[in-house]
């Protein structure tokens, strides 16, 4: 393989479109493996990233997005060429070093990386450790399939409200901040990591264009759920039609301490088809959606979350390792 000094890093705010532009037209003997490049582009739609170039052609890429004020989540580095393991690891090592430098310059304090446990590569794990990534915990992925004919039972005791982020009304903003603060004080998720603040969550939801719903009991906030879209933009939630196989991801769900053990979180999950307009008898029902999936994630050590998703009918589909890197430790390296 050529000396790594012949490689150049291209930083981009639109990784998918830049990859598509750089990969066309493909010439005979190209370094790029088309299927891998296509997967990388689809996985990084809408995200910034870093592309490693060899003689002007992309050979590896990694995407990232800011999860909170101090935390950046990075995608799995993708090598877009046929190469032996030591070459692949050298390219990934170069990408990791570059993304640590880039995100630290932007003020990030830590990096998070999720790795599918089933595809664990011992040599790649050695590379992560050499780059000062630590295995923090395991994360479980859950999925629930719901038919469009689903009918949610009436819940007269509860009031459900869509909450646009950012909240422009000062009184409502203060109420939501207070409710999230109370929920976070009792959080059992990612206990080994710094807990986000209410402001962190609101910033993340705004950045990800998440849709937030509240459950109120006697006008007081009892539960908050944030939904992201996996196969469509959040704007599609309000559109007239949806794809036949729509999907949502539960980015966050929390119940205030005084309302716990009443089944409210499971109730909110059961309301998702109606809240999003995919089911029900109202005029907003999206009749084009035959089925849709709800995906959720939980810390493998969070017993209450695991119990919630199991009781709500979710099936565990993956177990992933969460790796973390504290960027402030890199200052003196």
Image (spheres, grey):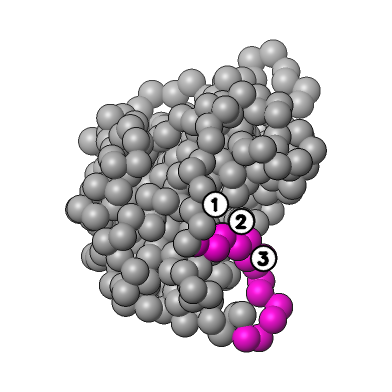
User: In what element is the residue under mark 3?
Assistant: loop
Residue density around tag 2, few if under 14, some if 14–19, many if 20 or more, within 10 Å: many
Most foreground residue, 6 or 142: 142
Q: How far across and down, in percent of the image, does residue 37 sit?
A: 60, 28
Q: How far across and down, in percent of the image, does residue 246 sit?
A: 61, 32
- Tell me if I can see residue 289 in this picture: yes
Instruction: Tell me: 186 left or right of 290.
Output: left
Mark 2 and mark 3 residues within 8 Å of each other at the beta carbon: no
Residue density around tag 3, few if under 14, some if 14–19, many if 20 or more, within 10 Å: some
The residue beneath circle 1 is 227
As drawn, the label of residue 211 is 2
Q: How far across and down, in percent of the image, does residue 19 sit?
A: 68, 36
Find the distance from the CA under tag 3 to the CA under tag 1: 12 Å
**Which residue shows up at 28% across the image and 30% down it?**
118
User: In what element is the residue under mark 2?
Assistant: strand
- Tell me which corner region of the image, top left, top right, bottom left or bottom right, holds residue 205: bottom right
Mark 1 and mark 2 residues within 8 Å of each other at the beta carbon: yes
Residue 163 magenta-drawn? yes
The answer to whether 33 is drawn above or below residue 227 in the figure is: above
Mark 3 and mark 1 residues within 8 Å of each other at the beta carbon: no
Most foreground residue, 309 or 8: 309
Residue found at the very far top of the displayed protein: 28
Q: How far across and down, in percent of the image, does residue 210 sit?
A: 60, 56
Instruction: Tell me: 83 left or right of 15.
Output: left
The answer to whether 102 is drawn above or below residue 107 in the figure is: above
In magenta, the rendered stretch is: 158-171
Q: Closer to the N terminus: mark 3 or mark 1?
A: 3
The residue beneath circle 3 is 164
Q: Closer to the N terminus: mark 2 or mark 3?
A: 3
């Amino acid at each position: 393989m050529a000396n790594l000094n012949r490689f150049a890093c291209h930083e981009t705010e639109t990784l998918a479109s830049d990859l598509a532009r750089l990969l066309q037209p493909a010439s005979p003997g190209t370094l790029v493996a088309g299927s891998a490049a296509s997967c990388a582009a689809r996985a990084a739609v809408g995200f910034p990233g870093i592309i490693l170039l060899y003689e002007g052609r992309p050979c590896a890429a990694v995407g990232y997005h800011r999860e909170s004020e101090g935390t950046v989540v990075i995608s799995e580095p993708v090598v877009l060429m046929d190469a032996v393991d030591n070459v692949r690891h050298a390219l990934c090592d170069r990408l990791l070093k570059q993304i640590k430098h880039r995100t630290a310059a932007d003020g990030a304090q830590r990096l998070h990386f999720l790795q599918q446990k089933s595809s664990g590569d011992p040599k790649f794990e050695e590379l992560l450790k050499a780059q000062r990534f630590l295995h923090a915990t395991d994360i479980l992925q859950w999925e629930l399939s719901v038919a469009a004919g689903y009918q949610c039972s009436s819940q007269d005791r509860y009031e459900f409200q869509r909450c646009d982020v950012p909240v422009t009304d000062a009184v409502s903003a203060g109420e939501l901040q207070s409710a999230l603060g109370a929920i976070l004080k009792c959080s059992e998720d990612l206990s080994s990591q710094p807990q986000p603040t209410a402001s962190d969550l609101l910033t993340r939801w705004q950045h990800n264009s998440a849709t937030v719903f509240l459950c109120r009991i006697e006008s007081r906030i009892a539960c908050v759920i944030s939904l992201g879209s996996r196969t469509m933009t959040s704007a599609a939630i309000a559109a007239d039609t949806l794809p036949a196989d729509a999907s949502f991801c539960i980015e966050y769900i929390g119940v205030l301490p005084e309302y716990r053990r009443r089944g409210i979180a499971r109730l909110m999950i059961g309301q998702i088809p109606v809240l999003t307009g995919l089911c029900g008898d109202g005029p907003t029902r999206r009749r084009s959606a035959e089925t849709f999936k709800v995906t959720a994630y939980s810390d493998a050590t969070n017993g209450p979350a695991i119990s919630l998703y199991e009781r709500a009918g979710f099936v565990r589909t993956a177990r992933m390792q969460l790796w973390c890197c504290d960027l402030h430790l890199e200052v003196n390296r």
